[in-house]
Image: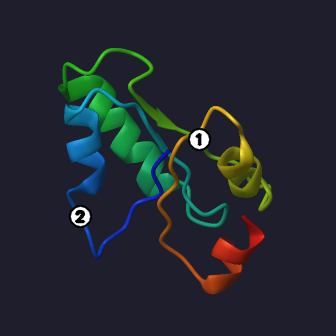
Amino acid sequence: MEFSAPDQPGQGWARLAAGNTLVLKPAPDTPWSAAVLGDLIAGHTDFPAGVINIVTSSDHGVGALLSKDPRVDMVSFTGSTNTVAAS
C-alpha cells in the first residue's frame, strides 16, 4: 500500500516495477486529484486492472483500516503526525 510521499517521489513506481500493487488513499477532504489520476492511469496506460487502486472515502478512519489490514506488507504516508499516529 502506498500513500504518496513527495519527499521520495519515485518510490511507488519503483515498487510497481518490482511487481507490487499500489493503493492510493487520498485524504477524505481532497479525493478529486486522486480520482483524476486513476482515470488517467486507466485510460492512458497498460497497467492491468487491480495493479493501481484508488480508494476514496469521506470516512477519516478508512486509512487506518487499510494500514492495519494483515494483507498489507508496507505503508508509506504523507500527512500530519495525527495521520501516522492513527495508524
On screen, residue 86 versus residue 18, left or right, reads right
Snapshot colouring: rainbow
* Residue ID for mark 2: 9
Task: Tell me which amino acid carries mark 2.
Answer: Pro
Residue at the (68%, 55%) spot, across then down: 63
Quarter residue 22 falls in? top left
Tell me if label 2 and label 1 are in contact, CB under 8 Å: no
Task: Tell me which amino acid carries mark 1.
Answer: Val
2 vs 1, front mark: 2
* Residue ID for mark 1: 55
The x and y percentages for residue 79 are: 54, 76
Furthest toward the bottom, the residue is 81
Quarter residue 18 falls in? top left
The x and y percentages for residue 84 are: 64, 73
The x and y percentages for residue 45 are: 19, 26
On screen, residue 84 versus residue 41, left or right, reads right
Q: Earlier in the sequence, mark 2 or mark 1?
A: 2
Callout 2: 10 Å neighbours few (<14), some, many (20+)? few
- Between the C-alphas of marks 2 and 1, the distance is 20 Å
Residue at the (70%, 36%) spot, across then down: 70
Quarter residue 13 falls in? top left
Q: What kind of element bears circle 1?
A: loop
Q: Is residue 28 above or below residue 39?
A: below
Residue at the (53%, 41%) spot, across then down: 73
Residue at the (50%, 49%) spot, across then down: 74
Q: Which mark is residue 70?
A: none
Furthest toward the top, the residue is 48
